[in-house]
Amino acid sequence: MALMAPTQQVKRRATNQGAAVKEALAAEDTFRSAQDVYATLRASGEKIGLSTVYRHLQIFVDDGLADVIHKPDGESTYRLCGDASTTHHHHLVCRSCGKAVEIEGPAVETWADKVAAQHGFSDVNHTVEIFGLCTTCAAS
Amino acid sequence: MALMAPTQQVKRRATNQGAAVKEALAAEDTFRSAQDVYATLRASGEKIGLSTVYRHLQIFVDDGLADVIHKPDGESTYRLCGDASTTHHHHLVCRSCGKAVEIEGPAVETWADKVAAQHGFSDVNHTVEIFGLCTTCAAS
DNA sequence: TGACATAATGAAAATGATTCCCGATAAGAC
DNA sequence: GTCTTATCGGGAATCATTTTCATTATGTCA
Ligand SMILES: [Mn+2]
Ligand SMILES: [Mn+2]
Ligand SMILES: [Zn+2]
Ligand SMILES: [Zn+2]
């Protein structure tokens, strides 16, 4: 049998654009769209293309550095995971400004797996997002 | 002061197209996209336009007759709520074929509200979806 | 410190789901 | 049957995201 090539870390080159996108995300604790990040970067004088913004956001997601939430209107929003976020977590998100708080719910995790198992589902994962208005936005 | 007009049930006319869309959804216990429903209806000889399919699917959602799940690729999928589904519920969905099972988790509901309250969030709601492979799809 | 291989970039075009527009059609009331 | 207007539906318009591909820049190694 052919040897399975060892899963190799894709070599990524360090570029200004990649750093700029990460900085833009790091500057806010809110979920932001690619279009939004792009506009912000261009407004601040960064030399970067829209395709590149999409590219890096997806890379962050693939590498587990960022989480993505798909809004009802179809737009995807991204946010860097907190320092201690190598672990599985979910978010409490402000519907108005996008501000997000990372949350954990061990009980929910076990519940989800149990329910799936009871119905014979395998290869299970789940999405849990709580939406609301943050204190700031509620006062408007 | 002006009298607030009583919230009036919008009068909806019974049309062939509306019935056709509902039948198409009722025929399957899976989440299906508007494009999919449209293709199915046209293939079966139904005389209906794409706009109309979108229109009725949205009406079902507004009336609480159907639930919608936004797939990661941006496509929205719809499914009629079960008979006993006047109550709040979530879904266990097959990533491959879209088959869905309605599920309830009282503990999750209270947990979500508690977490939101702890962070001062108001006007709270949430999304909870469990994805996996149904027994049928797992055997492939 | 140069080449070199190729990963990364970005402007423009393509894609694809969803929405909008508006003249034509048909359901429901009298 | 006639009238009012909700509903239709084909096509154009939107708009986020993806793709294309010639150009640029990064990492490597002599
Ligand atoms: Mn979880
Ligand atoms: Mn719930
Ligand atoms: Zn807010
Ligand atoms: Zn399945």
Image (tube, coloured by chain):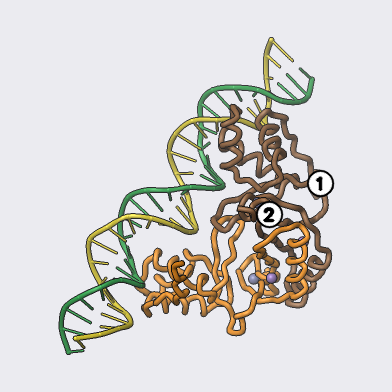
Chain colours: A orange, B brown, C green, D yellow
Of marks 1 and 2, the one in the foreground = 2
Q: Which residue is mark 1?
A: B3
- Which quadrant of the figure shows ligand 2? bottom right
Q: What numbered label is drawn on residue B44?
A: none
Q: Is residue A64 above or below residue D3?
A: below
Q: CA distance from mark 1 to mark 2?
A: 53 Å
Q: Is residue B110 left or right of residue D21?
A: right
Q: Answer whether residue B17 is visible to the viewer in this image.
A: yes
**Measured from the top left, where is residue D13 in percent x and y?**
44, 44
Label 1 is found on which chain of the structure?
B
Q: Quadrant of residue A69?
A: bottom right
| Residue positioned 75% across, 62% down in the render | A117
Secondary structure of residue under mark 1: loop
Amino acid at dot 2: Cys
**Measured from the top left, where is residue B76 in percent x and y?**
60, 50
Q: Is mark 2 within 8 Å of ligand 4?
A: yes
Q: Residue extending furthest front?
A: A1
Both marks 1 and 2 on one chain: yes
Q: What numbered label is drawn on residue B134?
A: 2
Amino acid at dot 1: Leu
**Measured from the top left, where is residue D16 in percent x and y?**
49, 58
Q: Quadrant of residue D9?
A: top right
Label 2 is found on which chain of the structure?
B
- Local packing at callout 2 (Cα closer than 10 Å; few below 14, some 14-19, many 20+) is many
**The one of D19 and B96 positioned closer to us in this rendering:** B96
**The one of B129 and D10 positioned closer to us in this rendering:** B129
